[in-house]
Image (spheres, grey):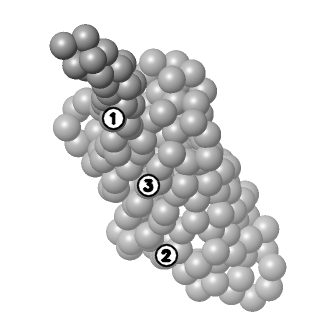
Amino acid sequence: MNRFMWILAVSFLVLIPLGMQAQAQPKEVTEAVTTTFYVTPKMLPLDEGRVRVNHEAIGIVLSDTGSGLFHQATIRVLGGMTVEKGKYNDERSWGVYNLQNGDKIFFTGTAAGDLKPGEEAKGVGTFTGGTGKCAGVQGSSTISRYQLRPALEGTAQSYSKGTVKYTLP
């Protein structure tokens, strides 16, 4: 009987950390989001029909469900692209999500598409880090972005529909 109790106690002590480890595994979360942007572009003419566009964009992210980590986050993006005849395929961007809880998530992105109002551009992003509870975040985003007619000359407005997938540590 003593041997049985000893084996049971050792088994219990070994299984508790394994059970806690299995329970602590992070899960991937997916959020459908809509983001609106206000953009200040800087146009640099290259040659006939070609222009380099560097931009800073600020925006608001709303989760389609009205809740989640990215709901009501603000976003700031710096980037650039070369535009030929209204189309581009080389947009590169870097940015930060400022979450409602005060944490930040940093990302890089790429996109390609059309700058004409109503036309679609496709993009992907990769999370590169975070602060606070989001330190060590892993994830990505995919978007479909649509340009709108600008409200003010020298600015641009757009909105994006997409998904954000992430795993917190």
Q: In this view, does 99 lie above or below 150?
A: above
- The quarter of the displayed image where residue 67 is located: top left
Q: What element carries label 3?
A: strand
Residue 80: % across, % down: 69, 62
Q: What element carries label 1?
A: helix
Query: What residue is shown with label 1?
Result: 22
Image coordinates of residue 40 in percent, x first then y, are 63, 49
Q: Residues within 10 Å of mark 1 (few under 14, many from 20)?
A: few
Rounded to the nearest angstrom, the CA distance separating label 2 from label 1 is: 43 Å
Along the polypeptide, which appears first: circle 3 or circle 1? 1
Q: Would you say residue 149 is visible in this rendering?
A: yes
Label 2: which secondary element = strand
**Nearer the N terminus, badge 2 or badge 3?**
2
Residue 4 drawn at (x, y percent):
22, 19
Q: Mark 2 points at which residue?
A: 113
Q: Nearer the viewer, residue 110 or 118?
A: 110
Is 103 situated above or below 83?
Answer: above
Q: What residue type is labelled 1?
A: Ala
In the image, what residue occupies the spot 47% across and 53% down? 140
Which mark lies nearer to you, 2 or 3?
3
Q: What residue type is labelled 3?
A: Ser
Find disc 3 in the rendering and name its residue.
Answer: 141
Residue 43 appears left or right of 101: right
At 58% from the left and 59% from the top, the residue drawn is 109
How far apart are the two marked residues, 2 and 3, measured between alpha carbons? 17 Å
Front residue of 19/162: it is 19
**Residue drawn 62% across the image and 46% down it:** 128
Q: In this view, does 42 lie above or below 165?
A: below
